[in-house]
Image (spheres, helix red, strand yellow):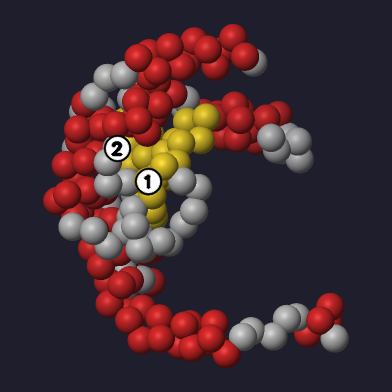
Amino acid sequence: MLVHLGGAMSPFNAWLIARGLMTLPLRMERHCHNALELARFLEAHPKVARVLYPGLESHPHHELARRQMSGFGGMLTVQLEGGLGAAITMSEKIRLFQYATSLGHAHSLLFYYPTDLYVDAAPYLSDAQKAGIREWMGEGIVRVSVGLENARDLMDDLDQALRGRSFKGVVGPLAYRLMK
């Protein structure tokens, strides 16, 4: 029965989900608001090469997203000017954001994807597809899941992390190349 119909949820888990659904619209509104504020801030930041967020006018599918969506979600894709070194420094310097691979948490999270790890881990891609991904990603992208914190606090945290410098941020890319 378990194989064909799946497991049965406990009453407590069902209650938690029902309770969480009551505030979901308010939480999503805050996620979307914070993400748009953060996307606009990052798009103008000198240490950021590019921001992809459907709420930005610069997004290639902004008009379509505007017609189809009431909010643009809480996920951003960011390409840093300094590639891996900048990402290492940022992950060391952030205070409010957590460096994690999860999505959609109430807390803001971010994670860096080095391009070669992403592309080389996909043996099902053709060489042309891999070349296209490498061209699009540059040295890598940062995935940002924007949480419910104060948007100004999140901007200040990212600003100080992007402007910071760290020893690991300088040596990390060199060590990474040596390990490959």
Along the viewing direction, whichever of 159 and 122 lies nearer the viewer: 159
Along the viewing direction, whichever of 178 and 12 lies nearer the viewer: 12
Along the viewing direction, whichever of 105 and 72 lies nearer the viewer: 105
The residue under the point 33% across, 71% down is: 28
- Image-based side of 120 in relation to 83, left or right: right
Instruction: Give the numbered dot on residue 98.
Output: 1
Q: Indicate whether 3 appears above or below 133.
A: below
Q: Amino acid at mark 1?
A: Gln
* Residue 88 visible at all: yes
Q: Amino acid at mark 2?
A: Ile
The residue under the point 53% across, 12% down is: 175
Picture quadrant of residue 68: bottom left
Would you name the residue on which mark 2 appears?
94
Picture quadrant of residue 99: top left
Q: Quadrant of the N terminus?
A: bottom right
Q: Indicate whether 68 appears above or below 17.
A: above
- Image-based side of 56 in relation to 88, left or right: left
* Residue 43 visible at all: no
The residue under the point 75% across, 36% down is: 123
